[in-house]
Image (cartoon, helix red, strand yellow):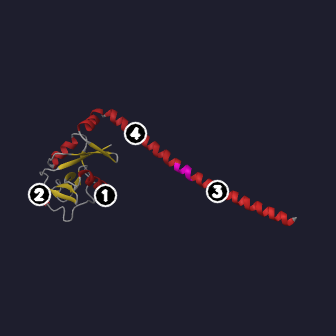
Amino acid sequence: MSRAASVCVGLLCVLLLATVIVLCVQLNTNKNLMQERDKLLLMNMNLTKEREILGHLIQENSEQWKHLHEMDEWIYYHSSLYYISSEMKSWSESRKYCTERGADLLIINNINKQKFVTKVTGGNNIWIGLTDSADEGTWKWVNGSTLTSGFWKSGQPNGQRIENCAVSYLTGWFDYSCNNAYKWICEKSL
C-alpha cells in the first residue's frame, strides 16, 4: 500500500507542478497583455489630446486655416504643414511668402526631414531656411539657431561673401546668392 500511496503522491506532485507552470505562463501572458493595453490606452489618450488641440487651433485661427487649406496646397507630415512653391523667388521673397502665412522657410535638422524634402520636391533645387548673411561663415536657421550639422554637398558651402543662402538639391545643400530665384518650401509647426 505504501508503494501505491507513494505513486499517487508522486502523481499529485507532478500534476501540482504542471498546474503551477500553466498558471505562471498564464499570469505572465496576462501581464504582457495588460502592459500592451496600457500602452494602447496611453497612445489613445495622446491622440485624443492632439485632436482636441488641433480642434482648438482650427477654431481659434479659422481664417488662417481656411487660407492654408483652400488657397494653397499644404502637406501634413509629422505634426507640421509644408508648402512647396510652384513659382521661383529670391530667398528673402520666399521667406516673406512663408511668414505672411504664419510659417517660415524649412529647417532641416535630421536625415528623415532631408529625405522627406528630397521626396516631396522630386530632388529639385529649393530654398531652405538657412543663411550666413548676418555673420559670414556662421550658418543660422531662420529661427536663430546655429547649424550644428548639415547635408552639404562635398565642397560646399563655397561662395564666401557672395553666396549666403542655402538651396537643397537631390545631392545635398549648396550655397548660392540670395538674389537667385528658386522654388521654396515653407514649414508651419502645429
Q: What residue type is labelled 4?
A: Arg
Mark 1 element type: helix
Labels 1, 2: front one: 1
Q: What residue type is labelled 2?
A: Ile
Residue topped by disc 1:
111
Q: Which amino acid does label 3 sit on?
A: Cys
Who comes first in sequence, dot 1 or dot 4?
4
The quadrant where residue 151 appears: bottom left
Residue topped by disc 3:
24
Who comes first in sequence, dot 1 or dot 2?
1
Who comes first in sequence, dot 2 or dot 4?
4
Mark 3 element type: helix
Residue topped by disc 2:
162
Who comes first in sequence, dot 3 or dot 4?
3
Say which quadrant the N terminus sits in: bottom right
- Of 63 and 144, the residue lying toward us: 63
Labels 3, 2: front one: 3
